[in-house]
Image (cartoon, helix red, strand yellow):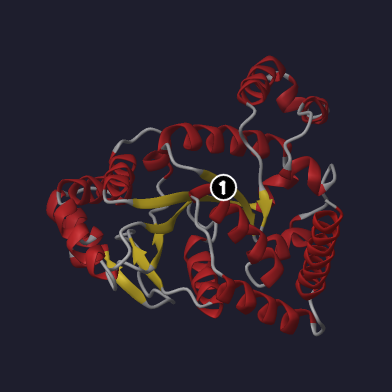
Amino acid sequence: MAGAAPTTAFGQAVIGPPGSGKTTYCLGMSEFLRALGRRVAVVNLDPANEGLPYECAVDVGELVGLGDVMDALRLGPNGGLLYCMEYLEANLDWLRAKLDPLRGHYFLFDCPGQVELCTHHGALRSIFSQMAHWDLRLTAVHLVDSHYCTDPAKFISVLCTSLATMLHVELPHVNLLSKMDLIEHYGKLAFNLDYYTEVLDLSYLLDHLASDPFFRHYRQLNEKLVQLIEDYSLVSFIPLNIQDKESVQRVLQAVDKANGYCFGVQEQRSLEAMMSAAVGADFHFSTTLGLQEKYLASSDQSVEQETMQL
């Protein structure tokens, strides 16, 4: 039917441990997407989020509040947050009623930082699964603070958590190393950045850990963890500096590829204009497009000549 609202919606489920930069990512990504011409709706699914810096289209705090749950049920922050997600899971009709009027928007879901929700608790996974039945195609964007790269033991732990999250959430998945603009302040890296983003031969990490008297006693355990990570061979990272437009663009390209989002010509032109302004000169997109046009023109001439000869 002409003029009907699109049935398929796209978006990102932004997950990660507390302090990894999820809310800041939602703010920066929403601004970037709006500059491209996308209609964006940011949805806060974290009942503990207060003082949101972005314009919130849907706030789970309208349905259930963490403070109220903790007072009424005498739960701590962790137990209260799990209860809130279970309550949302039991009241998905409320969420759907909020999302349906926003069809045609690109969704950013700011999710709670409770690690258990993404590694073994079923509420958040069930919510994402139900959204898929609503024809909402999501990519899980998992943020990890880049300072973990400075400590080999912590980096192995991050790899294990990222792998468990990928297997549990059951969504197309993009892992990010956030706060890359601050990584120099965290200390010197033992290896090049590519080693951490591509998760190359982890045996070098084991050798690095062996130099520490404490971790030397746990070498066999670390070897088994590294073997598990390499056997699955699923985890890799994209470095992110949310202040850098080129960095955000690389992340968006990976996310769009993961969930199948295809942007149009107008969005491509907006991207070219924005990136050209960012670098203060004509961006390489214009050169690439010009070469493509010349190639197509020369190809058409060759076809015409061959046709005439026949």
Q: Which part of the image, by quadrant, shows the N terminus?
A: bottom left
Seen in the picture, residue 50 relative to 162 is either above or below; the reply is below
Give the mark count. Answer: 1
| Residue 244 in view in this figure | no
| Residue 260 in view in this figure | yes
Could you tell whether 157 is left or right of 294 in the image? left
Amino acid on which disc 1 is placed:
Val
In this view of the protein, which residue sits in the foreground, 169 or 210?
169
Identify the image quadrant of residue 32. Answer: bottom right
In this view of the protein, which residue sits in the foreground, 298 or 282?
298
Residue at 82% x, 83% y: name it: 281
Identify the image quadrant of residue 183. Answer: bottom right
**Horizontal and vertical percent position of residue 256:** 54, 56
Identify the image quadrant of residue 225. Answer: top right
**Horizontal and vertical percent position of residue 218:** 68, 19
**Horizontal and vertical percent position of residue 42:** 38, 68
Badge 1 marks a residue whose secondary structure is: strand
Residue at 83% x, 69% y: name it: 294
Seen in the picture, residue 10 relative to 56 is either above or below; the reply is above
Q: 10 Å neighbourhood of mark 1: few (<14), some, or many (≥20)?
A: many
Seen in the picture, residue 120 relative to 127 is either above or below; the reply is above
In this view of the protein, which residue sits in the foreground, 293 or 37?
293
Residue at 66% x, 80% y: name it: 274
Could you tell whether 20 is left or right of 274 in the image? left
Residue of label 1: 174
**Horizontal and vertical percent position of residue 188:** 83, 51
